Amino acid sequence: MKVVIIEDEKPAARRLSRMLNEIGVEPIAMLHSVKEAINWFENNKHPDLLFLDIQLSDGLSFEIFEEVTINSAIIFTTAYDEYALKAFKLNSVDYLLKPIDSDELENAVNQYKNLHSEMLHKSFNLEQIRSLIYPSQKTYKKRFSVKIGQHLKMISIETIECFYSENKATYIHTTTNRSYLIEDTLEQLEDKLQPEVFFRVSRKYFVNINAIKDIISYTNSRLKIVLNNFNNSEIIVSRERVKDFKNWIN
């Protein structure tokens, strides 16, 4: 059985090689980068089994598959937590969690021997694995469009002091002391507003941390917020949100 190790940490690669030797498997190559691996696979016969680390010195190992079609069974080696391993389980991909245990390594090799053809032709969704391990950074609303007569006005998120509900409608209040009707409900806004900047202090209000002028103790262990321009009504932090609010402003 021909085996190749792709691992950017040379001590870890040598340790894995020794562990494989102890169970009668001798790796034919140890590769340490995406570039080195691509070059090797383009110029050599592919091994039976590949032990593949995910994070290499010059990028993610997934980049190898974008350049070369690998005709080998693959066992990923990873230090990622259980959440990331969900990606492998969903795709029925074999993996070993670092630091690699000798018994688990032997079991993985024996599994390969017993299920050679199945592992060799096993298909898996690399993009799904990539997206679960490296989820794309969530984006939040940068502006809102409001209708004024026959016109649409763009309002930048930086100019919004608060969002509030009134008579079953939702409004934006801006630093220019103007209020505008929007279509979103406060519930819908929860996933659209950057949580470091906006906090829902009650059923009726989302406030911008940069617009807070004063915070005043209020009855029943609540807090009263004064914004720079908004004076339509009092903004009270509901009692059950006070603790989270204090954590937010800190």
Image: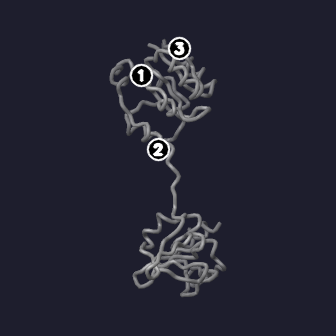
Confirm or deny contact between disc 1 and disc 2 (CB under 8 A).
no
Q: Amino acid at mark 2?
A: Ser
Q: Amino acid at mark 1?
A: Asn
Q: Is residue 107 visible?
A: no
Earlier-in-chain disc, 1 versus 2:
1
User: Where residue 71 is drawn, which disc sits there?
Assistant: 1
In the image, residue 65 sits, relative to residue 136, either above or below, namely above
Percent of width and height locating residue 173: 54, 79
Percent of width and height locating residue 18: 57, 17
**Few, some or many C-alpha atoms within 10 Å of disc 1 (few <14, some 14-19, many ≥20)?**
some
Residue that badge 3 annotates: 28
State the residue at coordinates (45%, 27%). Answer: 75
Q: Where is the C terminus found, in terms of image quarters?
A: bottom right
State the residue at coordinates (52%, 58%). Answer: 139
**Few, some or many C-alpha atoms within 10 Å of disc 2 (few <14, some 14-19, many ≥20)?**
few
Q: Nearer the viewer, residue 41 or 55?
A: 41
**Few, some or many C-alpha atoms within 10 Å of disc 3 (few <14, some 14-19, many ≥20)?**
few
SS for tag 1? loop
State the residue at coordinates (57%, 19%). Answer: 30
From mark 1 to mark 3, how far is it between C-alphas?
Answer: 16 Å
Q: Amino acid at mark 3?
A: Ile
Which corner quadrant of the image does residue 73 belong to? top left
Residue that badge 2 annotates: 131
Q: Where is the N terminus found, in terms of image quarters?
A: top left
From mark 2 to mark 3, how far is it between C-alphas?
Answer: 31 Å
Percent of width and height locating residue 114: 35, 19
